[in-house]
Image: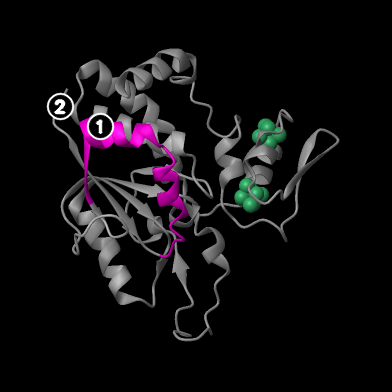
Amino acid sequence: MANKIKLGHVHFSGCTGCLVSVADIYQGLLKILDDYADLVYALTLVDVRHIPEMDVALVEGSVCIQDHESVEDIKETRKKSRIVVALGSCATYGNITRFCRGGQHNQPQHESFLPIGDLIDVDVYIPGCPPSPELIRNVTVMAYLLLGGNEEQKALAGRYLKPLMALAKRGTTGCFCDLMNDVINQGLCIGCGTCAAACPVRAITHEFGKPQGDLNLCVKCGSCYGACPRSFFNFDVIPEFESISELIADVLK
Ligand code: SF4
Ligand code: SF4
């Protein structure tokens, strides 16, 4: 196997819940840190003050554009990282920070928060509030294989990451409306209920076999669209589910 990759966690306007999801990989995280990745930056966990060169940056939180240091730091993150991963719904879509309007003590001018994709190019999205530990684990393992695996592993990792890269290209807004616009109104919805199961605030119910969204509850996390099997069903990877599961289990043994 290749050398360990340099992994970082870069924290912007997030709640650290995404980092808790990283920790929730439990033994798998210890194995990753033992064998595959050095954690070179994470202000919560590592005493490194300045953003170093990273192979993979897991970026949590949106960016307050009135906070010049944050704006500089996200640009620095892009410059120093081979793969930038928007970790969680604040980084991918703004999420709850979409509702910020400023006016609060002691920085009332901090009123505008953007998903990181509005400021830099992002390679991979891991949506979710919180994002799933399994998905973070899989992306980390696949990024390792993509950067340092053999040709076959690189090809598999590329296929695995492709839909999450496509999500990153698709845009920076997440909402129940995505299901309306891109799934239901396109005649693609099969009424499976996955979107309702994925919604962290139970904004989605099913009526007459089709999802109904309560936009007053929706926190704009984008999880429902990401989880919907009709949003970007990846025919390259899903049939390989067993071999991918075995590969990840092998890597983490
Ligand atoms: S997850 Fe997608 S296909 Fe399934 S009910 Fe929701 S919108 Fe329809
Ligand atoms: S409906 Fe639920 S899952 Fe979908 S964007 Fe809104 S809060 Fe997130």
Find residue 227 and report its horizontal and vertical position in percent: 58, 36
- Left-right relation of 143 to 177: left
Q: Is residue 16 visible?
A: yes
Q: Which residue is mark 2?
A: 2
Left or right: 79 in relation to 178: left
- Asked if residue 217 is positioned above or below residue 4 in the image, the reply reads below
Q: Position of residue 14 (x, y in %)?
A: 44, 61
Mark 2 Cα within 10 Å, few/some/many (few <14, many 20+)?
A: few
Label 1 Cα neighbours within 10 Å, binned few <14 / some 14-19 / many ≥20: many
Residue depicted at x 40% and y 37%:
26
Percent x, y of residue 10 = 31, 56
For disc 1, the marked residue is: 144
Q: Quadrant of the N terminus?
A: top left
Asked which colour scheme the image uses, the reply is one colour
Regarding mark 1 in the picture, which secondary structure is present there?
A: helix
Q: Which residue is most to the left?
A: 3
- Looking at the rendering, the stretch of residues picked out in magenta corresponds to 13-40
Q: Is residue 64 above or below residue 167?
A: below
In which quadrant of the rendered view does residue 24 lie? top left
In three-dimensional space, the C-alpha distance between marks 1 and 2, rounded to whole angstroms, equals 8 Å
Amino acid under disc 2? Ala
What is the x, y in percent for residue 117?
39, 55
Q: Main secondary structure of the magenta part?
A: helix
User: Relative to 161, is 106 on the left or the right?
Assistant: right
Residue 15 among magenta residues: yes
* Looking at the image, residue 213 lies above or below residue 147: below
